[in-house]
Image: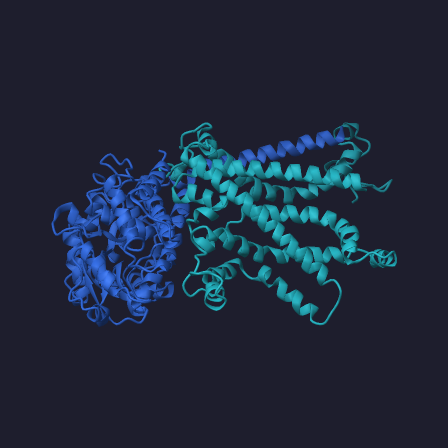
Chain colours: A blue, B cyan
Amino acid sequence: MRRSRARTAVTATLAAAMAAVTAACGGGSTTNGEGSNDKPKELTYWASNQGTSIAHDKKVLTPELKRFEKQTGIKVKLEVIPWDSLLDRILAATSSGQGPDVLNIGNTWSASLQATGALLPWDKKNMAKVGGADRFTPSALAAAGAPQKDPAALPLYSLAYGLYYNKKMFEDAGIDEPPATWDELVKDGKKLTKGDKYGIAVEGGDPVENAHHAFILGKQHGADFFDSSGKPQFNSDGAVKAVKQYVDLLADNKIAPPGNAEFAKRESVRDFAKGKSAMLLWQAAGTSLKSNGMKPDEYGVAPIPVQAPGSGEKGTRSMVAGINLAVFKNTDNIDGALKFAKFMTSDKEQRTLNAEYGSIPPVKSAQSDKAFDTPDLKVLREVLTTSSAPLPQVPDESKFETLVGNATKDLFADAAAGRKVTTASVKKELTAAQQQMRK
Amino acid sequence: MTTLSPPPGTSRPAPAAQAAGNEPSLPRRRRILPDRLRRAGLPYLLLLPALVLELLIHLGPMAVGVVMSFKELTQQYIRNWGEAPWAGTDNFGIAVDVNAPVGEALLHSFLVTCAFTVLAVSLAWLLGVTAAILMQDSFRGRGVLRALFLTPYALPVYTAVITWSFLLQRDGGMVNHVIHDQLGLTDSEPFWLIGDNSFAALVIVAVWRTWPFAFLILMAALQNIPRELYEAAQVDGAGMLQQIRRITLPSLRPVNQVLVLVLFLWTFNDFNVPYILFGKSAPEAADLISIHIYQASFVTWDFGSGSAMSVLLLLFLLLVTGVYLLATGAGRKRDV
């Protein structure tokens, strides 16, 4: 009797506590708050890792933040977050409501994060506070949220893919100029592949890189990974061709080293810098190449090849890559956050920061600076303005990067293990990826 | 203490006595809190802070997870997930429908995890028990060896596993350097971090990490077996193997029961080792369930579906633990 009564009491306590906890967490009421000015003297800023290391980023940003503090009296707490955990951290901050005031996001996540409703929309009123939408290049602004909606972020650093090639190795192989079409690239690659040297380095184990190349090649084959209503179509003929062509650099053409199939920690940049491979498809690699010991006059940069000379969609040579700056809607310092966004997108900061990171300013008036007239940045800027397309700005974009990127990674693994990669096997992988998108 | 056994004849102010509830002249009080219950209640009272914290830290999130698994919690709702629509058992339906891609992938991952767990736990236990028995007699350098054996367990998991990932790289990794370049065991350099070999790589690293724990626990347990038993066995002419079979292993039984269970739960749920070794997307051959669920929720932003899978995993582990305890418990009783 005594026992059972005690047990009932314990059970009741348990149930009550559980109910209380569930109610407290389930409501999520803390995240409903709109922006306020409760803490006007401080801001928390999450920066993405743009430099060669976290420490490098801190060194670059700290003096700028100090300058902002001098101008406005607002102290900015800086946290630099590595890419592999940035999205997780943002999602956690979104669901808990405990996040930064201002943050960097990869521009391809813009529409996905926009759909969560956590980011402050840059409507006319807010945009006016940073000088108006006209200040930004249209292509960069197109990668800041779904079309027909107010942008969810401001472009901060712009990047584009380019073909980096080793001048000396090209000369030694008797190649006069960088390839303009993929056929030429494969032909040149075969000339360059000798012994333990290879034609091209790929980051085959990195889903995000894979997805970007699938997108660019897809455009060149006239394939979109989402239809106009935002529905996934990962296994169209064009998509299959695109992914197969990319994997074939290692599989069929054998101009990329098999070991590249497991690269996911920027080893391909290192291998290119060390002269193990003669070509590299990368976005603004200048800073990383320098830190790997390659001098700027040792490499050249050309636009990524196309299938056949031509223009329009099929002439796409890059995605609009880059970093956007967003403000969390529930910030405790909305005025300060807007001031900070204005500061970061000001001509002066844009010049300083983009020059330091080797990227291109998405702010038009900041582009006219000697720092951005280097041969490689000139090429990338040209690509960005004339022949780049933003990744699909749909809420499911991040799933595309994961699923198609992983499918490509698996195909690289197959190829590296000596298994044949055929149109059928690519189609099968992409179909499986598509089926994971159940909603 | 005074509340439990007041010395007779002590006079004290009435309110205090009432508050303490021990005034024998108040029959009403006595009916509500009989002496025996009061005495029995004290341990529960003392346990209460721990219980509340346990509820908050462990059971609370678990309950939230169960609630989430019944919701359609995608990116549209994570900001305010009270508003996410109820999905009924949809998330579970999709997770267990093994004929559809999502369920099929989950089943595959589950089977991989089972195979991985059985292999890793048995190898870790075997290594642990062998080393513990061999190190029971004192010899020169025993202390050094013991310390050495425990290093994998003492190292921070990230440091240890990232080192393994360097060792296992195809080009320039030390594993391939030894088995291919120096020993010439393979025709070409195998991949360890992608493709089918990744399963073997995962098992090796997991065993390397967990066996020192088995070793530590078993070594402690061996100290408790009375020496006289072995001496008596020797007098009766039992050899080394017979001593192990008839004395050591039966004496270790209660420890083994707990040890194997703990190892099983740790290994089955292991997230750190595969995540650090393979990154966010594990190769199919080494797609452990914890990583799979992480992918389902974080990478594809579908937290309801991920929670449903977690709940299924929780049920499975509860079932295994229950059956295991019943089975081993019954066996032990028969023995005694």
The reply to whether residue B94 is visible in this rendering is yes
The number of numbered discs placed on residues in the rendered structure image is 0
> Could you tell me which residue is drawn at 79 percent across and 39 percent down?
B334
Q: Is residue B326 above or below residue A316?
A: above
Instruction: State the residue in front, A247 or A304.
Output: A247
Residue B82 place in picture, x, y as percent: 43, 34
Residue reaching furthest to the left: A310
Foreground residue, A323 or A33?
A323
- Left or right of A247? Residue B120 is right
Tell me if A221 is positioned left or right of B216 in this view: left
* A69 relative to A11, above or below: below
Q: Quadrant of the C terminus of chain B?
A: top right
Residue A242 to residue A263: above or below: above
Q: Report the residue at 64% width, 44% height from top.
A: B49
Indicate the quadrant containing the N terminus of chain B: top left, top right, bottom left or bottom right. Answer: top right
Q: Is residue A341 left or right of residue B35?
A: left
Relative height, residue A29 to residue B139 (above, below): above
Residue A25 makes an appearance in the image: no
Quadrant in the rendering for residue B85: top left
The percent position of residue B31, horizontal first and vertical second, equals: 77, 28
For image coordinates 85% across by 42% down, the residue present is B7
Q: Give how far across and how far down residue B147 sits, in percent.
A: 64, 66
Q: Nearer the viewer, residue A406 or B175?
A: B175
Position of residue A65 measured from the top left corner of the image (x, y, whole percent): 31, 62
Using the image as rendered, state which of residue A415 and residue A13 is in the foreground: A415
